[in-house]
Image: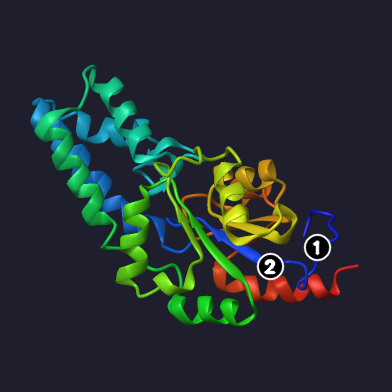
Amino acid sequence: MTKTSNANAHTIKGILFDKDGTLLDFNGSWLAPYVQVTQFIAQSMGRPELKESLMTDGGFIPETGGWVSDSLLTSASNQQILEFWSQQIGQPIVGENLHHIKQIFSRAASRYAPAIEDLHGFLNRLKARGMRLGLATMDDEKNARRMLATLQLTGLFDFVCGADSGYGVKPEPGMVHAFCQSCGLAAKQVIMVGDSPKDLNMGKNAGAAYSIGVLTGAHDRAALSAHADDVLDDISCLNRFLRGLNSAP
């Protein structure tokens, strides 16, 4: 743990989670939809070379199946991604093409891979400790709520927001501040948990007690360590982290 803080397991009252790469395995959830969308754009433009370049320009590394740190496709909003792809192809994505792409993104929100096997049990245990739980994603809010409903997690979350909810985008602090306001918490009582530098820096910019990175997303330990107070294998390790706060000097 690299951050000096007066926070301990008793003063932490809320945990704000990112969605993709944190509650969900990133590649298991989003790699196939991204490939499907870029194939569609390439076909509709009659430019087959776009299939690869739209992925690699967005940060995908085909040789390894990994991603460039803090790249567009790993941490941007759907709107930011669409604007970037429009710039890459030299024309706006509109009309039926835009509708079709949004449908692919929407379907992706109900076909996903949870980051840990017992996600429901893990979150229930945090609630049993009295934690207020929030979800802050760069996906659209409706997609986040659809994911929670499908996994039967809706009742466990006190707050849900997306990039389109009006609280700004990561790494701006607005989503953390909105979570705190909604749940009656101070930022120093909150842990931000995410898989990208944008998640972690959002927590820091908001004054959260800790910004914790997890390795179930598109970034490795080295990429997260520069921004995180700690880096965990996955969210299940939060229980150990919280126990460690009690023994910290």
Q: Residues within 10 Å of mark 2 (few under 14, many from 20)?
A: many
- Callouts 2 and 1 close, C-beta under 8 Å: no
- Residue 108: image location, x then y, percent: 26, 55
| On screen, residue 44 above or below 88 | below
Q: Which residue is disc 2 drawn over?
A: 13
Q: Please identify the residue farthest to the top as the structure is shown.
A: 90
Closer-to-camera residue (70/19) = 19
| On screen, residue 95 above or below 240 | above
Report whether residue 229 is seen: no
| On screen, residue 116 above or below 183 | below
Task: Please give the label number shown on residue 7.
Answer: 1
> What colouring style does the render use?
rainbow
Residue at the spot 83% in from the left edge and 57% down from the top edge? 5
Q: Specify the quadrant that holds the N terminus.
A: bottom right
Q: Is 55 on the left-hand or right-hand side of 200?
A: left
Q: Residues within 10 Å of mark 1 (few under 14, many from 20)?
A: some
Mark 2 or mark 1: whose residue is earlier in sequence: 1
Name which residue type carries label 1: Ala
Q: Is 38 on the left-hand or right-hand side of 15?
A: left
Name which residue type carries label 2: Lys
Which mark is in front, 2 or 1? 2
- Residue 62: image location, x then y, percent: 34, 43
Which quadrant of the view contains residue 155? bottom left
Q: Is 16 on the left-hand or right-hand side of 240?
A: left
Which quadrant of the view contains residue 35? top left
Which quadrant of the view contains residue 26? bottom left
| On screen, residue 145 above or below 51 | below
Q: Specify the quadrant that holds the C terminus.
A: bottom right
Q: What kind of element bears circle 2?
A: loop
